[in-house]
Amino acid sequence: MAGIKALISLSFGGAIGLMFLMLGCALPVYDKYWPLFLLFFYILSPVPYCISRRVVDDTDSASNACKELAIFLTTGIVISAFGLPIVFARAEVIAWGACALVLTGNIVIFGTILGFFMVFGSNDDFSWQQW
């Protein structure tokens, strides 16, 4: 039952994060949809880690180059997702208020993605692989 509660709370977190992103785009004051390019970063951020989990043998407790590369690429994707709205705001493509809403959405969505891998990433009876 704890897995269902975690799944519901993660879904709620994702919905709240997307709401902030949409508010930063669709409010009549801002009315620019350039921040929707962040959806690509949301989709791409877990991909390196998922690939490295499939490739790497977890019996080795030492650090692995594949996992380190996956963490590096994921960090680059997340930092780019935070930098893109700031670049848009500095270039006056979007307003600073929209940038703040989009950055708030970034924090919530990347926290939700991190929470997903913390809850469902372990190799116990209730893992994310069964979904």
Image: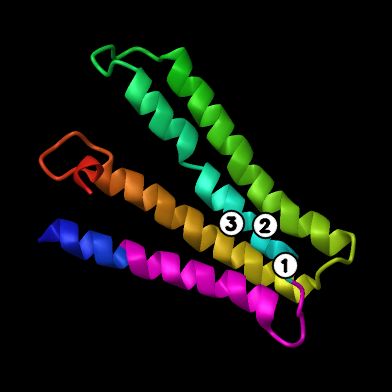
Q: Is residue 30 above or below residue 43?
A: below
- Identified at 77% across, 73% down, the residue is 32
Q: Position of residue 130 (x, y in %)?
A: 19, 44
Q: Position of residue 15 (x, y in %)?
A: 43, 70
- Give the spatial CA distance, label 2 vs label 3: 5 Å
What is the chief secondary structure element of the magenta stretch?
A: helix
Give the residue number, with chain letter if any, for mark 2: 37
Q: Name, please, the residue furthest toward the bottom.
A: 28
- Marks 3 and 2: in contact by CB < 8 Å? yes
Identify which amino acid the numbered label 3 is placed on. Leu
What quarter of the picture does the N terminus occupy?
bottom left
Label 2 secondary element = helix
- Looking at the rendering, the stretch of residues picked out in magenta corresponds to 10-32
Mark 1 residue crowding within 10 angstroms, few (<14) / some (14–19) / many (20+)? many
- Disc with the residue nearer the chain's start (1 vs 2): 2
Give the residue number, with chain letter if any, for mark 3: 39
Give the residue number, with chain letter if any, for mark 1: 99
Mark 2 residue crowding within 10 angstroms, few (<14) / some (14–19) / many (20+)? few
118 and 26: which is toward the camera: 26
- Identified at 36% across, 51% down, the residue is 115
